[in-house]
Image (cartoon, rainbow, N blue to C red):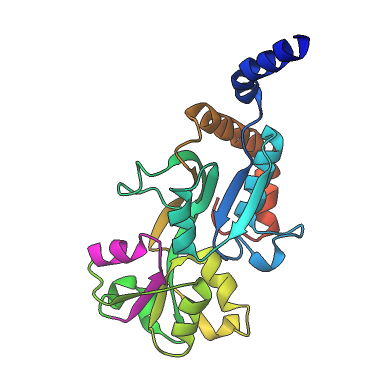
Amino acid sequence: MRLTRHIAWLIGALPAMALAADPAPLKLMVGDMPPYAIAAAATTTAPGSLVEITQELGRRMGSPVEVQFYPWSRAVAMASLAPRTLVLPITRTEEREHKYRWLVKIYKQRLIFVGQHGNRKLADPALLTRSRLTVLRGTPYKQLLLDAGYTDVAECATIKECVRMVKTGIADASFGAEDTHRTAASTGGNKAADFDYSPPFRHGEVWLAGSLDISEDEARKWRTTLDTMRTDGSFARILHKYNATGN
């Protein structure tokens, strides 16, 4: 009888125990975008500036973050469907507004064009309106350029591919974040001196977003914790470690 009552008590207590349990671990979906997220260094002390900031935020909040790398367009899609999922670096747009929980504006990046060394049109982006351009698939940059009057905009799967298209003459210029383009232009067999850059064309806000099952209370904790990191200097130290051009 005692055993029966004990089992009945356990069954009755299960809902309360479930409510008291810690939230499921968070998975961070990212693409290979050095210096923001570096697949080759994911298990080292230099996993990428924005990945490292997110991991530190999670550590301070008691919510460990597991990093998973996917092609960028797939990472963006998965984060809107899979539970307890984060994604960055993502741009907040009207189309995406109701697909994610927008946790924290984490970074402000400079958006530029990069072309082969000697491309004089880079000095004035308005001269590139009829040039062959490429942007990373899964970003809002293609629509941004089309809306600005650029007429020939293709997409590529990775920043490395975008830069390779410029290097081989398939594209006249690639458009996107200065940080990722400068890194791609100086690694993987590329030489920085082979490329030139435009002045900043736009500035873009980079967000850390999550799946909709993440509560607004949790979102406020992310924002408060990032404010603390900015105040104590750890945010700036991480960006400096990766030679970030934004803030």
Q: Name the quadrant of the N terminus.
A: top right
Residue 235, by quadrant, is top right
Is residue 187 visible to the viewer in this orientation of the structure?
yes
Is residue 199 visible to the viewer in this orientation of the structure?
no
Depth order, front residue of 175/159: 159
Magenta includes 65? Answer: no
**Looking at the picture, does residue 64 appear above or below residue 142?**
above
**Looking at the picture, does residue 166 appear above or below residue 183?**
below
Question: Residue drawn at (69%, 61%), measured in percent from left and top?
Answer: 42
Q: Position of residue 176 (x, y in %)?
A: 44, 66
Q: Position of residue 234 (x, y in %)?
A: 70, 43
Is 130 displayed left or right of 47 in the figure?
left
Question: Residue drawn at (70%, 49%), measured in percent from left and top?
Answer: 237
Residue 151, by quadrant, is bottom left
Question: How many numbered dots are placed on residues in this image?
Answer: 0
Q: Position of residue 18 (x, y in %)?
A: 62, 25
Q: Position of residue 81 (x, y in %)?
A: 44, 48
Q: Residue farthest to the front?
A: 1
Residue stretch rendered in magenta on the structure: 131-147
Magenta includes 145? Answer: yes
**Looking at the picture, does residue 224 appear above or below residue 191?**
above
Residue 24, by quadrant, is top right
